[in-house]
Image: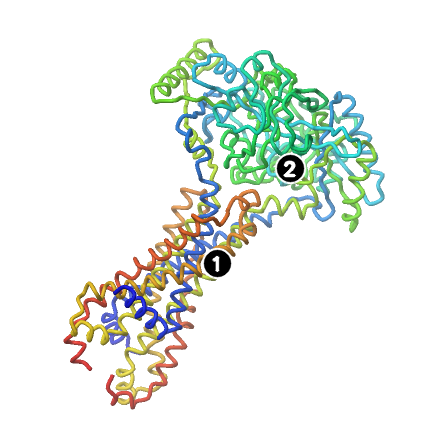
Amino acid sequence: MFAYYFELGLRSLRRNPVLTALMVMAIGFGVAASMTTYAVFRAVSGNPLPDKSGQLFVPQIDNWGPQSRKTGGDLPESLSYTDAMALMHAHKAVRQTAIYPVGFTLVPVDPSSQPFAVNGYAAYADFFAMFDVPFQYGSGWQGVDDDNRANVVVISNELNQKIFAGANSVGRGIQLDGRDYRIAGVVADWDPRPRFYDVNNGSGFGDAPDVFMPLTRAIDLQTETLGNNNCYGTTGQAPGWDGWLHSECAWISLWVELPDANAVARYQSYLEAYAADQQHAGRFHWVPNIRLSNLMQWLDREHVVPKETTVSLVLALGFLLVCLVNTIGLLLAKFMRRASEIGVRRALGASRRQIYTQFLTEAAVVGVAGGLLGLLLTAFGVLGISLVFEPEIARLARLNVSLVGFTLLVSVAATVVAAFYPTWRAARVQPAWQLKSN
Amino acid sequence: MQIKPILAALRRHKAGTVLIALQIALTLAIVCNALFIIQQRLAHMSEPTGIDEANLLVISNQWAGHRSPQEVDAQIQADLAALRQLPSVRDASPSDGYPLTGGGWDNYVMLTPEQIEKTTDASVYMGDEHMLDTLGVKLIAGRNFNASEVMQMTSRQVVIPPVVIVTKALADHLFPDGSALGKPIYSMSSTPSTIIGIIERLQRQDVKTWSKPYAYESLLWPMREDTDGLYYIVRAKPGQLAAAMRAVPQALYAQNRMRIIDPKDGGTYAQIRERIYDSDRGMAILMCIISAVLLAITAAGIVGLTSFWVGQRRKQIGVRRALGARRGDILNYFLTENFLISVGGVMVGTVLAVGINLWMMARFEMARLSLAYVIDGVIILLLLGQLATLAPALRASRVSPVEATRST
């Protein structure tokens, strides 16, 4: 029966090629616009660490006071060195790491090649286990290396390719800014999008890091942060590196791993107690104000999804809606023109259900055709996406199997939904009235 | 033209009427907002920087290997001397950033050392006595820095120069009575900087939404940054930008190869603008595409439904023609019918457009939609409706009175 309706549908669509083409185009354009913008939205709004995102948390501490938020603004997005170190030493979470972005220069042994920049992060040994970092060779450094302020680094696969031609370089030396480091491990290709652990210093979609080193060592070497350094207040700070370390400037991120709700509650009360201690010690002149956000809450708070991406998606969905309204109108015209045919079929014994099946099948055919056109246009859209979105975001959007499937599904579902009203009208046709009027 | 019979006829095609009106309403709502976004983005992109963009280029220079602040400072001096001697170069200055960097240093500015709350927020530029000439900004009051005032800043030193040059926008914000020259200001420190000069205009380093309230509020400090790296701002002689683009990196590498010039940062102002306004341009293009396709689809939908109605009413049209209606009357009938539906649609659409705008204002820091865009949108859609109806209506007007006598 379905095959018969399918054939009827095709025949009917061929009868009004212009109307059919209009519907297919409307569906195709609507779906393509939505899917192209959705591809971008999906790329930037995804969960970068789905298995663990519920267990990773970012603490924030108000070390500037409510005065700093009088003209808007929120708690500082990073911690001062003082607070970050206090939280690290307290060791109240299963795992914890302070992080800040660092940059070095690497001078190749070959004197004819130019020096190049090597950027990465200063962190603690827990970083690698917390964030499920995969290793090509070796592993992260150990906790003792943090304590010993050891000259060790973990490098990226890309950097390893560049200097060691991809060979196992664990245990070998590397010179950064003229200082020697021992390589503890080579990270396999690992670049979560967004780079959740550093969204406060950039878009979260920039180039992957080349190197990781113990934060304790980086501090000893007075390695500047490549990220934001936010200070508040006029009294300023003592001059020099130590003056800066002990200032209230916020520039270090802290991540903690808390496996369950109890651990979260305990950490929350620890933070409150810590802030209260600081108040008693006279450092904070205000009521303790702390916050603990999990990974996805943090990405939301930091507005990782660019507002352009969301606005585009919303307007594209509005566009799809107009296309659907358009399709409803055209289907209505098409179906009602066949009132007499429906009358005859009903008079010959077709049930309302059969009329429904027939016309929805016809609509589904339009949906499939629209979907195929939409797919073609989406492919063009994804190709041309760099015209519309920033390069570092545009390169994330890809046409893959799930997007292809979703595009077809959306267009068929949308068309069938759009066809319900016209079909309902068609099924209500009174056979007697139709037959009489002819 | 009688409107009553048209309304009576429309009542018999409620569904079709409502669908067309709805489509017009949604299209209007989206197109108004899209046009508004396009205008906002284009306006943002065309904001002037106040500098001689046509002849400027920026080099992002990072030092390779380890060297002392004294060595770095000597190298910077040597680099600048070499750059200023190039035949294609007019002047050059060291800096910590450049207009439209997309990030960079900004400081709270206060009027007294005791003040806790900021008076405003200024974008901070470092440069030497060549900075004003290099940027090509106009000094409208006071004087430039002299060479002896230029200080060195090494890593994490808190250096507050005793003199500062500010933009007119910053001077007016701080001292609305126009008395800025010679006054002290305090920038995240209890050490004052005296305003010795006022320049006409200098764009901030960062032009994101948050900095809008402080547009063009910048200050210049006479400093050289002897840390890991810096920017060289170079002003080419008129028409010699391309030559300078080639000569400058060569001259720097000839001075010392142990440096990294970042190809993704700096460049000519054409490149810098392209980078910073990337998402704005993208948004404008996307909104143009969406508006154009949307209008086309709506027009096509109106053509389709009107054609259907004409087909359905051939007999009635024939009867009217037989009873003496002229072709013009039939044409008029369909055009008026479409006009009535469109008017209903744009009324709903106006409400929707304002609703969408209010929602985007709350959610995405969008500005308030100006009425002009709604009026433009209404005119566009009414015209579009009439044009789309024209072809089927002309076909209807050609229906012969004989149709009245034919069955079906």
Quarter of image, res B249: top right
The residue positioned farthest toward the top in the image shown: A281
Above or below for B45 versus A290: below
Say which chain tag 1 marks.
A
Horizontal side of A97 relative to B206 (left or right) equals left
Q: Position of residue B76 (x, y in %)?
A: 78, 29
The disc at residue A37 is: none
Residue, disc 1: A377
- Taking B199 as reference, is A400 above or below it? below
Residue B24 image position (x, y, % from top left): 37, 62
Q: Mark 1 belongs to which amino acid?
A: Leu
What is the tally of numbered marks visible in this picture?
Answer: 2
Type of the residue with mark 2:
Thr
**Visible in this render: residue B159?**
yes
Location of the N terminus of chain A (image quadrant): bottom left
Q: Is residue A149 above or below residue A15?
A: above
Front residue of this view, candidates B370 and B391 = B391
Q: Quadrant of the C terminus of chain A?
A: bottom left
What's the residue at 41%, 51% (across, down)? A405
Image quadrant where residue A289 sits: top left
Mark 2 Cα shell of 10 Å, populated few (<14), some (14-19), many (≥20): many
- Give the vertical position of A102 relative to A381 (above or below): above
Nearer to me, A108 or B195 = A108
Q: Identify the colour scheme used.
A: rainbow
Residue designated by label 2: B167
Q: Chain of mark 2?
A: B
